[in-house]
Image (cartoon, rainbow, N blue to C red):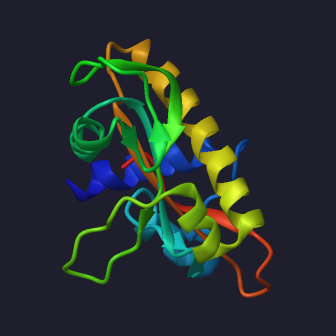
């Protein structure tokens, strides 16, 4: 399991690098040359970032908690959707539906874009939204060529110690 998870994480990090940088570091750069063979294909090293306190959820289909919200209000995270959608129906365009970052052991809660702006600021919220939708579209397009549907996905982002770089810390989960 862990070997395949490492391969998947490295693949996603490499694949998404033209959209945003990831938190992955080449493990060979942090060990002595004579130790590199021991860790080849067996280790991951990541940068430590301060997390942006929102979950970046993108939905291409109306399912899960988005479906529940839609049934109650006709909207998901404040985004009004057309009437009459069916469960698991593909949306005309993917939508950015942020969530709060809940403490460990609790569930994240869907929030509006305005609440995301209040949490991380307008600039961060706009960047996270743009990058998340782009990543989702590219992943969904690639997955479709393999017969896989990505209904929705969640990304997490953080920033380095200088507060400048927003890095993807979790992709396509």
Left or right of 123? Residue 173 is left
Which residue: 50% across, 68% down? 54
Which residue: 21% across, 24% down? 87
Count of numbered marks: 0
> Is any atom of residue 26 visible in this view?
no
Pinpoint residue 124: horizontal percent, then vertical percent. 71, 65
Above-or-below relation of 2 to 172 = below
Left or right of 10? Residue 84 is left
Left or right of 161? Residue 85 is left
Pinpoint residue 8: horizontal percent, then vertical percent. 39, 46
The foreground one among 61 and 172 is: 61
Which residue ends up furthest to the bottom in the rendered image? 161
Pinpoint residue 39: horizontal percent, then vertical percent. 43, 68
Pinpoint residue 126: horizontal percent, then vertical percent. 71, 55
Above-or-below relation of 137 to 171 = above
The foreground one among 138 and 146 is: 138
Which residue: 21% across, 42% down? 68
> Is any atom of residue 173 visible in this view?
yes
Q: Quadrant of residue 110?
A: bottom left
Left or right of 46? Residue 124 is right
Which residue: 25% across, 47% down? 65
The foreground one among 74 and 130 is: 74
């Amino acid at each position: 399991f862990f070997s395949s998870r490492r391969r998947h994480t490295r693949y996603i990090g490499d694949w998404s690098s033209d959209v945003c940088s990831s938190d992955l570091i080449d493990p060979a750069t942090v060990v002595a040359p004579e130790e590199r063979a021991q860790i080849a294909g067996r280790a991951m090293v990541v940068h430590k970032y301060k997390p942006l306190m929102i979950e970046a959820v993108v939905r291409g289909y109306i399912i899960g908690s988005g479906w529940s919200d839609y049934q109650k209000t006709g909207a998901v995270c404040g985004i009004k959707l057309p009437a009459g959608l069916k469960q698991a129906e593909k949306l005309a365009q993917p939508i950015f539906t942020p969530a709060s970052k809940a403490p460990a052991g609790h569930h994240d809660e869907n929030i509006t874009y305005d609440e995301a702006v209040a949490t991380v600021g307008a600039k961060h919220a706009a960047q996270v939204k743009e990058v998340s939708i782009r990543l989702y579209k590219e992943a969904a397009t690639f997955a479709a060529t393999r017969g896989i549907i990505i209904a929705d996905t969640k990304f997490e982002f953080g920033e380095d110690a200088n507060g400048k770089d927003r890095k993807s810390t979790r992709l396509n989960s």
